[in-house]
Amino acid sequence: MALDIDKALHSKKTRRRLLEQSGDDNPQLTDLRRDIYVLEAARLILLSSAQRKSPRRGIVSDASHVGIARTILDEAKAPLHIDEIVAQMKTRGYRTNKSALTSRLSKMVRDGQIFKRVDAATFALIGWRIESRPAQRRVGNGDWGGAEREGRNFRLLKQNRRP
């Protein structure tokens, strides 16, 4: 639908330019300007908020690290852990920073673009029909109120608390 609007906008803007160059005060020019305004408003409504902010957002070059990661996942036809993706990139001769790549892929997951996270640090392409595991929070192994809750820091807090 957005492509149809883009085509219509392009043809109307081309026609408007031709009429403006002719120099005549053509009544069709007012109608064209109104049509262009309406089409641009409709286009903005149809576009996602991410695309409104940056039209190139979500477009990834095949030569970028994200593009290479997408190619690796596409060839593997299965979700891969970030370590496996980085290892594949290194065998292909690319140097990459694991944390930077993880960050970039995570941002794309958050924005709903190209990738989805199926497990901790494991990514798949968004078009695949794979269920994502819900994030599970560890409890008990020193993680926010488990067995070590009575540890040194907690005791100090209890001592310093006023009645």
Image (tube, rainbow, N blue to C red):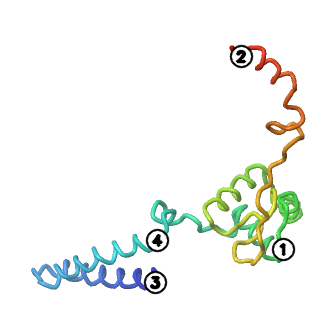
Could you tell whether 143 is left or right of 125 in the image? right
- How far apart marks 1 and 3 lie (CA) works out to 31 Å
Helix, strand or loop at label 3? It is loop
Which one is earlier in the sequence, the residue at label 1 or at label 3? 3
- For mark 2, what is the residue? 161
- How far apart marks 1 and 2 lie (CA) works out to 53 Å
Point out residue 35 in the picture as x, y percentages from the top left corner: 26, 80
- How far apart marks 3 and 4 lie (CA) works out to 10 Å
Which one is earlier in the sequence, the residue at label 4 or at label 1? 4
The residue type indicated by label 3 comes to: Met
The residue type indicated by label 4 comes to: Leu
- For mark 1, what is the residue? 78
Along the viewing direction, whichever of 152 and 25 lies nearer the viewer: 152
Q: In this rendering, which labeled residue sits more in front, label 3 or label 2?
A: 2
- For mark 3, what is the residue? 1
- How far apart marks 4 and 1 lie (CA) works out to 30 Å
- How far apart marks 4 and 2 lie (CA) works out to 53 Å
Which one is earlier in the sequence, the residue at label 3 or at label 4? 3
Point 73% across, 72% down: residue: 125
Point out residue 160 in the picture as x, y percentages from the top left corner: 74, 14
